Amino acid sequence: MQGISSRWLLKVLPWVQVNGGTYRVNRRLSFVVGDGKLTFSNIGDRVSVVPEELGELPLLRDFGEADVLAALAGRCEQREYAAGETIAIAGGAAEHAVLIAHGKVSRRITGKYGNEGRLGLLADGDFFGDEGLVGDEGTWPYTARAETRVIALLLPRRAVRDAMAASPALAEHVGSYQTRKAIPHNRSGEAEIEISSGHAGEPALPRTFAEYELNPREYDLSVAQTVLRVHTRVADLYNEPMNQVEQQLKLTIEALRERQEYELVNNREFGLLHNADMRQRVQTHSGPPTPDDLDELLSRRRETKVLLAHPKAIAAFARQCTKAGIYPSGVEFLGRRVPAWRDVPLLSCNKIPINDDHTTSIVAMRLGEDNQGVVGLHQTGIPDEYQPSLSVRFMGINEQAVMSYLVSAYYSAAVLVPDALGVLENVELMQNGG
C-alpha cells in the first residue's frame, strides 16, 4: 500500500483520555480581542472590505449594527503601493487604520544607534494603526513599508468619529471597549493576578483570583468510519497462508489512520492549521523558508518540541540553508535520525497542503497537557476495541454472503493555550531559475 506515510503527527501527539467524549479547556480570561484577519471582495480592480469583517478590529469586536459597519466600510479609501514604497512614517500623524487586502508590509523602527530594524511582517487580511482610531490623536510608532505590491484600504479616524456621532450604540460600544482596555492584564492579554513581592514593613497583601473565560471551549471527539466488506467464500477458502480478513482490516486501518492525521491538520473545527492563534502566525521574510523565518517561529513560544512541514518545504528550507552556507545537523528522535533546526526536530507531514500558488505552511508545537501545549484526544476502552480508540464491529452477513465490519476511529486535538501552536505561512516552494 503506497498510501502509508510516516504519520509523525500521530506519533508525537500526547494522547489524553476523554471519558465523556468531550474535553473542556478552561483558560484564564483574556482581554486580547479582535486578533483575526479581515476578508475582502473585489469587482475588477475595486477592492472593498466585507462590512461584517470589520468586527475583527479590536475596537469593533462584537459590534453587531450591520448598517453602521457598512457605513464604515464605505468610508474606506483604496490605496496601492509599489514595492519599497512607504505607507506610514514613524512620528507622522496616525490618522487612519491600514487594512491590507493584498501584499506584504514590514514594520520598521530606528535603533538607538541609528540602525534600522524590522519588527515583523504583515500580509493579506492583516491590519495596523487601529489603536489610533479613537482617543487622543497619536503618531506612528514605526515606519510601515511595502515589501511587495500592496493593495490597502485606509479607514480614516474621522470616519469613526462621524459614525460615533451618528450612532449612540457605536459610541456606547467604544466606551465599553476603552473601559476593558483599562482593566489590568499581563503581556499575554490575560486578566492580571496581583502579587506582592519584596519586604518593607508590613504592607497589606493584594487580594486576587484567577479569572477564567465564561464560555470555555469544548472539544468533541470526531470520528472516521468505513464499512469493510469481505465475501465469506474468501474468508472460508483463502485464509491460508494469510488470514484474508486480517489483511483487509490491516489496510483499512492504515487508510483510516491516514485520514485521521489529515483531519488533525486540516479540519476546520479542530485542525492545527485552522486553530492557530492569529498572533502566532508568522509571515516569511522573502518567500522561501529561511533560517531567520524558523528562528522567528521558534521565538513565539517556549519549549517548542517539534516542527512539522511538507517534505517539499523541508527541501526548500535545506536549499536556503545551503545558500547561506549553513549545514544544520539532524537529531535522534524516536529512534530515527531526522532533520532539525536549533535541535528541534523538523518532521515531514504530507497532510499539510500545498496551495495553488505553490505555497505551504510550517507548524511549530509545544506538546503535552502538563506543559500547556497541544494534545491529542481519544477514548480507550470502547466496545469492540481493536486498537486504542479504534473499534471493529461485526455487522452481520447479507443475502449475498458478504460479511461487513464497521471500522471506527475516534480522535480530536486541543490547543491548551494560544502560544502552544504557531504557523509559518506563505512558504514558497518554487526554485529560482537560472
Image (cartoon, rainbow, N blue to C red):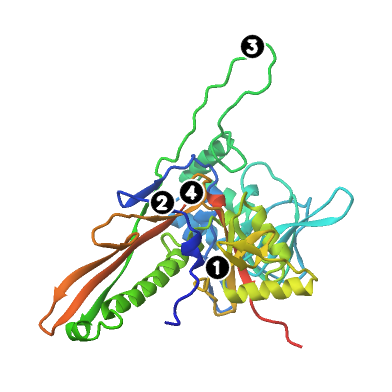
Q: Earlier in the sequence, mark 1 or mark 4?
A: 1
Q: CA distance from mark 1 to mark 4?
A: 35 Å
The image shows residue 332, relative to residue 208, as above or below, that is below
Contact between marks 1 and 2 (CB within 8 A): the answer is no
Q: Earlier in the sequence, mark 1 or mark 2?
A: 2
Q: Name, please, the residue furthest toward the right.
A: 113
Q: Earlier in the sequence, mark 3 or mark 4?
A: 3
The image shows residue 241, relative to residue 7, as above or below, that is below
Contact between marks 4 and 2 (CB within 8 A): the answer is no
What crowding class fits label 2: few (fewer than 14 Cα within 10 Å), some (14-19), or many (20 or more)? Answer: some
Q: Which residue is mark 1?
A: 48
Q: Which residue is mark 2?
A: 16
Answer left or right for 29 relative to 380. right
Q: Which mark is residue 202?
A: 3
Query: Foreground residue, 419 or 262?
Result: 262
Answer left or right for 295 relative to 182. right
- Residue at (59, 15) in percent of width and height: 204
Which image quadrant: the C terminus? bottom right
Q: Closer to the observer: label 1 or label 4? A: 4
Residue 155 in view in this figure:
no
Q: CA distance from mark 3 to mark 2?
A: 46 Å
Residue 109 in view in this figure:
yes
Contact between marks 3 and 1 (CB within 8 A): the answer is no
Q: Which mark is residue 416?
A: 4
Contact between marks 1 and 4 (CB within 8 A): the answer is no
- Residue at (55, 45) in percent of width and height: 32
